[in-house]
Amino acid sequence: MSTEKKRILEEMASLMREIEKHDEAYYVHDTPLIGDEEYDRLFRRLQELETTHPELASTASPTRRVGGKALDQFVKSKHGASMLSLANAMDPAEFSAFDERVHRFLELDPEKPLEYFAELKFDGLSINLVYEKGALIRAATRGDGETGEDVTENVRTIRSIPLRLRGSDLPERIEIRGEIVLPVDDFVRLNREQELKGQKPFANPRNAAAGSLRQLDPKITASRPLTGFFYGIGEVKGWTPPKTHAEYEKTLESWGLPVGPLRKICNGAGEVVDFYREVENTRDSLPFEIDGVVVKLNQFTQQQTAGFVARSPRGMIAFKYPPKKSVTLVEDIQIQVGRTGALTPVALVSPVNVNGVIVRRATLHNQDEIDRKDIRIGDHVVIQRAGDVIPEVVEVLKERRRGDERRFRIPDHCPVCGSPAVKPEGEAVTRCSGTRCIAKLKERIKHFVQKDAVNVEGLGDKIVDQLVDEGLVRRIPDLYDLEFSNVLPLEGFAEKSAQKLLTAIDQSRTPELYRVIFGLGIRHIGEATAKLLAQKFKSIEALAGAGESELLEVGGVGDEMATSIREWFSHSENRSELEELLHKLEIQAPLSSGLEPIFAGKTFVLTGTLPGMTRSEAEKLIEDRGGKTSGSVSKKTDFVLAGEEAGSKLEKARTLGVRVIDEQQFRSMLSGN
Ligand code: IVH
């Protein structure tokens, strides 16, 4: 190598080290050492050298964090060691029972306190990082615990996760487990942006983190301020871990990985409960969500001795907090009209912070609930958010009443269209009986275009409201008649966005049958039932003509669903709207087997005798779901389904690294796991 090249390589290496140091200071420790300008200068210099000398650029360069090419789909990635789950303790008594169990298992004196390591239970998405000789070579989601999805390109964009570990005594290979989270402030900001873009807001920071990480386009992930915390260990080669969990996390920290901010070695269960309480008091001021603390035997040898029960280590437990509650004032009660005309009372409350999310509305479900809890306008109430954005009222603080609170009754007319509201005998829900109710129409359209139905990308709630309010869409089929000149004048639209919307509508013209069935919004028919119905009837016309008894033949369809389907098709308005819709759509019929193509593109090889099914039965199960079977194992084989006395094919699968499954695993794949 020329001396000039050597010099450049050295400069690159030194820039990388420098940038990594600043990334760690900024993203892991929250204490920047230099200003943005200085940082940008280093970054740009490195980029410049990499552009002029691409052959010298390192794959671990921090410039690669911007997100590479988009993928078509995620590749599966098998974990070296399984990713297990944790048992829960819901209160100190349950924790104490855990402590006693562990003593028994380790055959230790129950009076002698055990040494525990306690830390936060991050409410995010678990991740498995693989580092080889210090370089991040793979990142995968948990998946089913054995195999996850390869999200390496996305994880590379997370600035707090080092692309190279710092230090010298690094393992040949190590799996490091942790949790990817989205801080609450960023979650709130992201949701605001989602709504502006007409996209559905995420229900909570965990879903937002998962949605951001599982993006096929790494550039989108790069734009989301994800971070991670690391605490776990999987497969290790060429390295001896320390003796305790506390030391292990210190090591992770020294390698430059972020670890939880609150950690404690506790001497006995009492100290653990103290820690649990302390953390509970600071929970609200943490920048990210937690749902408990995790408690682990600190000594690795003790963890090993304790072993496992089911899929959880006996020496660890998730010590959870009850759902977060807050007190606020019911300022008013409003009626929200749903897709099926359900009039749902919603409490408008004084804005209150519940677990970092500002809450302004809480559902009251229906009149019976209001009466049972005796909720009145002007009441102080306890609201609870159990993971989702729309919280509910748990109880009324009656002692805070002053006498001027007002009772509320759901009106007997729809507040939007004025049609009579009806509450059938024995049902809890009051419904608008109007056939031309604009509120219902809006909700029906929103339901029809959502991702799990025909999926019109970018057609969010606000745009639907506009289209209906402007009289451009009076029935669902009208969507497909929209023209550029209709959309362009709408507020917030420009040429590009109008065209984009029309393209998205156009792309939804060839939906799979089940998406249309689900999209119709028939009461009680969710996505799963829609799939079953599509499999059985294979066309809308057949479904429309099906009698009650035929409907009941579909596994999973009960009386209530069958009645609801019959009723939906018996309305002439529904029928005529549907007929018009069928002219606009080209519906894709399901596979001839009618089953979901879960094995599409996958090749199986069968070997040995399966305990519970014949070979031809297994073949049919595979083919009915779009998969292929082959007689010999090659690199192209996706699965070898092995029974008893499996011979050379099994061996070949092992040498080629093809995934081998047994009948039980096969059955669990069939049932959708
Ligand atoms: S230790 C056997 N520590 O909680 C699994 N898990 O409910 C060992 N989690 O799958 C996990 N924070 O994704 C551990 N400090 C923490 C954690 C934590 C969050 C997640 C993890 C796990 C789930 C179990």
Image: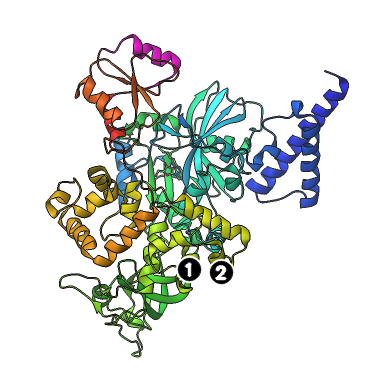
The residue at the point 18 percent across, 46 percent down is 554
71 or 455, nearer to the observer: 455
Mainly helix, strand or loop, the magenta region?
helix
- Percent from the top left, x then y, of residue 298? 45, 37
Q: Quadrant of residue 524?
A: bottom left
647 or 26, nearer to the observer: 647
The image shows residue 464, relative to residue 600, as above or below, that is: below
**Number of numbered labels in the structure image:** 2
The residue at the point 61 percent across, 25 percent down is 133
- Mark 1 to mark 2 CA distance (whole Å): 8 Å
- Percent from the top left, x then y, of residue 12? 78, 32
Does dot 1 land on a helix, a strand or a loop?
Answer: helix
Q: Which residues are magenta?
A: 645-659
The image shows residue 203, relative to residue 316, as above or below, that is: below
Q: Quadrant of residue 571?
A: bottom left
Residue type for callout 2: Leu
Picture disc at residue 467: 1
The C terminus, quarter of image? top left
Picture disc at residue 490: 2
The image shows residue 610, relative to residue 69, as above or below, that is: above
**Is there any visible trace of residue 104 in the rendered image?**
yes
- Percent from the top left, x then y, of residue 30? 66, 51
Q: Residue furthest bottom?
A: 404
In contact (CB < 8 Å): disc 1 and disc 2: yes
Query: In the rendered view, does 65 fall on the left or right side of 145?
Result: right
Q: Mark 1 vs ligand 1: CB under 8 Å? A: no
53 or 597, nearer to the observer: 597
Q: Mark 2 vs ligand 1: CB under 8 Å? A: no
Colour setup of the view: rainbow
Q: Residue furthest left?
A: 549
